Structures are given as C-alpha cells and as structure tokens.
Image (cartoon, grey):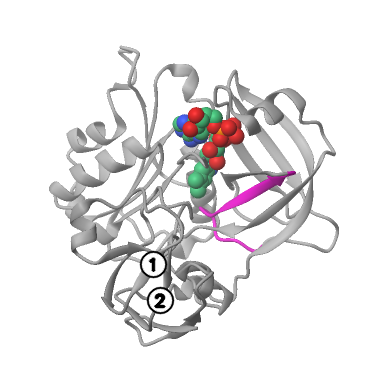
Amino acid sequence: MSVVKLSNSKVFSCSREQTLLEAARAQGLLLEHGCRTGRCGICKARVISGATSVLIDEASLDQEDLSNNMILTCCRTAVTDVELDIEDLSELAGYSVKTLPCRIDALQMLSSNVIEVTLRLPPGNFLQYLPGQYIDIIKGSLRRSYSIANAPQGDGKIIMQIRKVADGEMSRYWFEEAKVNDLLRLEGALGTFFLRKTNASELIFLATGTGIAPINAMLQQLASEVSLNTYSAIHVYWGGRHESDIYFPLDFSMLDINFVPVLSRSASSTVANGYVQDVVIAAGIDLRKSIVYACGSEKMIESAREKFIASGLEPRNFRSDAFVSSN
Ligand SMILES: Cc1cc2nc3c(=O)[nH]c(=O)nc-3n(C[C@H](O)[C@H](O)[C@H](O)COP(=O)(O)OP(=O)(O)OC[C@H]3O[C@@H](n4cnc5c(N)ncnc54)[C@H](O)[C@@H]3O)c2cc1C
C-alpha cells in the first residue's frame, strides 16, 4: 500500500491494483473526474513527488503533459508514496456511489434519433446526486454512461436523453428492444460536472446534441434554488446540425435566460449558424467575468476550452463533461 497526499493535506492509501481515483473514492475522498476511461482528461493531476504506473491507457495526455509530470488519476496507481497537486471535492462528501436495480418507467421518442428513458428505483431506494452528474447503465456485460436530465424530484425518478449511435450496441437495445418494466442496473452518481460556487457574473451553458441533458438538470436546480442564481445573465447555447437536433423544449418559465439555438449545417435566417463556441465568442460576452459549463462532443469541448481561455476565461471557470465513447 502506498500513501497518497493531496495539496490540502488529505491522505488516502492506494493498492497496486486500484487507480488513484478509485482508491480515493473508496476512502470517502472524491477527486475531479469525468469518463473514468482516460479519454476526457478531466482528472488530470500533477505529480509533485513519488512514482506512479499506468493501469489504463492515458489517451488524453499529450507529450507536454507527460513532460510536466501530469497523470490521469482514473488511469494510474501509486508505486511509492505520492504527492499530488490537487484537492478533493468537498461538495460531494457523503455522496456514496451505489449500484441499484431499476426498471424502465417510460420511453418516449424526442426526435427520430433521441429517446427519453425514465427509470424508477425499487420502493425505499433513492439515488443521491447533484444535477449535472451521470450514471452508468449496466445491461448484462454492457455498461454505458448517461447524464441525468432532471434535478432530483419527489418521486425519485431518473430521466435520460439518449442519442442513437450508428451500430452502437446499447443503442440497439434502447431503440429496438427496450420495453417499459425492463429490469436494468445503474451505478452512480458519477462525475464532477455540477454547479460550482463562483464570483463570475455571467453563466454560460454550452451543449451539443444530448449534452443538453445535464444542463437541463442544472437549469431546473437554478430555478428551484433561488440562492444559487447569483448571475447577472444566464446564457444557453445549444448546437446541432439541423433544426430537428434542437429536439427538446427547455422550460424557462422560472428563469430569465438568453437561449440561443445554433445550427452548423443549415443556413437558417432565424437562428444562429456555425459552431456554438464561435457564436459565443461573436456575441461579445465578457469571458473574463464568466463561468462556462460545456457538455457534448469532445471536439466542441476542446475547441471551446482553447478559444475561451484565449479570450480571457479563467481556466478553472471552464467546466466540462465530454460524451466520449466507452470503447
Ligand atoms: C460521462 C458520459 C456521459 C454521457 N451521457 C450521455 C447522454 O446523456 N446521452 C447520450 O446519448 N450519450 C451519452 N454518453 C455517451 C454514451 O455513454 C455512449 O457512448 C453512447 O450512447 C454510445 O453507446 P453505444 O453502446 O450505442 O455505442 P458503442 O457500441 O459503444 O459504439 C458504436 C460505435 O460508435 C462510436 N461511438 C460511441 N459513442 C460515441 C459518441 N458518444 N460519439 C461518437 N461516436 C461514438 C464507437 O467508437 C463505435 O465505433 C455519455 C458518455 C459519457 C462518457
């Protein structure tokens, strides 16, 4: 067992079979993370001292990261005692990750390639989560991640918005076989994409495709917890290729929102055209005073991060969840 120390002096032990992220979680410390497969890069951390080794390929690290002693905590284990230049997240202290049985409560097509799946848990069970987090759905040997599209509600139901991926194994199930009352398992809640306390005055949500799902949950939270809404403006930029990709009527009755649908492959004169990140820059919002939550394709997230930081956004004010493939 090695001892791992964080920059806020908290410590946990890690065996050679565990990733640093898993070991921390097992001991009640939550580290920043996203996909847990090395692809999204959210769990990147700098090693101050000690030796680590790779358990899962660190696909999202580049040569510069490696030469700066960066590692992914979802991919590496500790070989000696290690000191990391990151802190744990106190917001989620006490939120345990559970594996629970669940049944499909309702299925509804939202467009030709997006289905809404509502899950219910057995009586007496509930899932504790923060709006923006995701769950893994387990069906036999298949496991896929899906964001929760609703803030916690009284009936404990969990709603997901799922896009059909061509030749996708789980897509085949959702779009061709799934029936109301099917029994599945879920693991969650996972991920660290949730609203943070900040001094920023403008709140910008950026989504492509079903990336709007966790943003919808966060908007519901902002509408119901008035004290969270400390912003002078809330913007929602939702990008798709065609009009049919803006498949979901967001309910803003409780919030004053600047909603901008953006189409990349359709020259409409009534909505913005181009890529969401470029439309935000063109809008002239002061990114130095903003916090951004971006969810959807990896490509959009990488491009948005780079462009927004170059335009003055503080790097820690760019929060993201990339819908990377699980295989
Ligand atoms: C944290 C997280 C949250 C997610 N939340 C959602 C969500 O709320 N809604 C949602 O629709 N999806 C979401 N995803 C993506 C989802 O987990 C699956 O990857 C996706 O549904 C495809 O699964 P599949 O079994 O149908 O396809 P697979 O059998 O896994 O893949 C089939 C083929 O498609 C490619 N592929 C798989 N996924 C993608 C992708 N996302 N983009 C491009 N190519 C892909 C694969 O590389 C493969 O070639 C999320 C992913 C992560 C990591």
Q: Is residue 317 magenta?
A: no
CA separation, marks 1 and 2? 6 Å
* Whole-percent x, y for residue 230 in the image: 36, 61
Query: Could you say which is closer to the camera, residue 63 or residue 203?
Result: 63
- The magenta stretch is 128-140
Measuring 19% from the left and 64% from the top, which residue is drawn there? Answer: 68
Q: Is residue 132 magenta?
A: yes
Measuring 35% from the left and 84% from the top, which residue is drawn there? Answer: 8
Q: Residues within 10 Å of mark 2 (few under 14, many from 20)?
A: some
Q: Secondary structure at mark 1?
A: strand
Is the residue 24 above or below the residue 275 in the image?
A: below
Q: Which mark is residue 53?
A: 1
Q: Give the mark nearest the N terminus, 1 or 2.
A: 1
Is the residue 269 above or below the residue 160 in the image?
A: above
Instruction: Report the label total.
Output: 2
Which residue is the site of mark 2?
A: 79
The answer to whether the residues at label 1 and label 2 have Cβ atoms under 8 Å apart is yes
Q: Is residue 151 visible?
A: yes
Q: Quadrant of residue 296?
A: top left
What type is the residue that disc 2 sits on? Val
Q: Is residue 253 visible?
A: no
Measuring 47% from the left and 51% from the top, which residue is drawn there? Answer: 37
Query: Could you say which is closer to the camera, residue 107 or residue 12?
Result: 12
Q: Which mark is residue 75?
A: none
Q: Secondary structure at mark 2?
A: loop
